[in-house]
Amino acid sequence: MRIWVWSRPCFWLHGQEKELKGDISSPLHYHLHLHLHLPHQYVMCQIPQSCDATHVTLLTQPDHVKDLKQKWLPIRNKVALKKENEFEFDFTVCVSTLFGGYNNVLQFAQTLEMYRLLGVDRVVIYNTSCGPELNRLLHSYSQEGFVEMVPWPIDKHLKPSWRWNPTEHGGDLHYFGQLTTLNECIYRSMERSRYVLLNDIDEIIMPYQHDSLTSLMDTLQPQHPNTGVFLIENHIFPKKHFEPSQRFHLPQWSGVPGINILEHVYREEPDRSRYHPYKMIVQPRMVEQTSVHEMLRNFGERFKVPPEVCRIIHVRVPLQGSLTLEQLKVDKRLWDFHERMIPNVDNVLRKVGLLSSDQQK
């Protein structure tokens, strides 16, 4: 297999740019994701130092390149000569695919506004399909510049699995290409963002001893200077259990589709005798290849952040369904931000016509 690179060379000919094609050999990195039985490939291309490459394409029949209408992909992660503290973003959240008409509007808005309060500058979302109300909200966030929407019509070309285990749910592609989108987002952000958070849209990576992700990483990074991967433990907040006082059962949100995460304060203690998933905060420049819950190839060290320092707030169906309410922990960390989060959520919902002024308390 050959990799062909279209480049803008360092010289001009008769006032016109010259197209230069280089026949570059490159090893094909192949990884079979454990337990999923669905192979996926990573292609790494070493660009010659003499080339200032701007686009790349992958050919299976390079001898017929003139007969093919190739799609050239722009190279988005070119290394720029800049100081370490000069990044467009400090924190980027990578959210793998929305699909199946996903329309959990309220939890989505609460999560994005919570991340904004924690210091996130940009959220990248790969959208296969979502509900009409969520689509309006996403469009508003995109116009503002807080969300970068990446169209992901993978279901037009392949039969994706709707769940993580294809042996149970079928399909020829894992979870709408989740592994591909996570890796693409890392490379998309490599030279633009100091840190990248890899988590699902119903998860919040929440500091418990700091008031922002900035102060969290300003503490952790000097303590672990050679670390590029920080693993954050997942904690489930079952959505079937509600806080009894109904303090945050707010009338203005009654007509908004989705879950109100402020109402769910009961947390499962992880069963650490079994495999327990993590999500990650990474320095993208120290990453080569990731999976969903662990890093596959990276430079430097990895560090598991203690849950008392930072953990994931994950409001969803129970993982340990047999636990009684008395066996759950009360965790009201989200409430520490309610005075700023609630009006911000109200504003974004009102902006897209999902919250009218007369619904306000």
Image: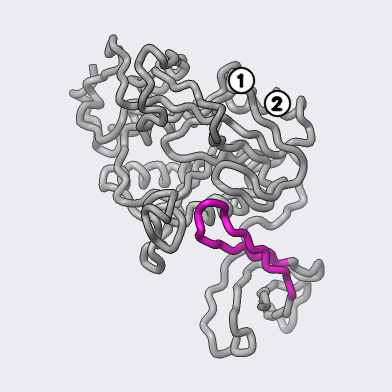
Is 46 part of what is drawn in magenta? no
The segment highlighted magenta reads 25-45
Residue at x-position 40% and y-position 68% = 157
Does residue 199 appear left or right of residue 219 in this picture? left
In x, y percent, where is residue 150? 46, 54
Give the residue type that dot 2 points to. Leu
Instruction: Look at the numbered discs 1 and 2 and tell me whether their residues touch, using CB distance below 8 Å.
Output: yes
Q: How many marks?
A: 2
Q: Secondary structure at mark 1?
A: loop
Disc 1 residue type? Val
**Disc 1 packing (10 Å; few <14; some 14–19; many ≥20):** some
Decide if residue 285 is in sight here.
no
Q: Mark 2 or mark 1, which is nearer the start of the sequence?
A: 2
Q: Which residue corresponds to mark 2?
A: 220
Residue farthest to the right, as pictured: 49
Q: Is residue 358 above or below residue 56?
A: above
* 42 falls in the magenta region: yes
Placement of the N terminus among the 4 image quadrants: bottom right
Left/right of residue 231 with respect to residue 302 in the rendered view: left
26 versus 263 height, above or below: below
29 or 253, nearer to the observer: 29
Evaluate whether residue 160 shows in this view: yes
| Residue 121 in the image, given as x and y percentages of width and height | 54, 37
Which residue is depicted at the point 51% across and 82% down? 69
The quadrant holding residue 259 is: top left
SS label for mark 2: helix
Q: Position of residue 318 (x, y in %)?
A: 37, 29
Q: Which mark is residue 309?
A: 1
How would you rate the neighbour count of disc 2 (Cα within 10 Å): few for under 14, some for 14-19, many for 20 or more?
Answer: some
Front: mark 1 or 2: 1
User: Residue at 65% of width from left, 67% of height from top?
Assistant: 54
In the depicted structure, whether residue 268 falls above or below residue 319: above
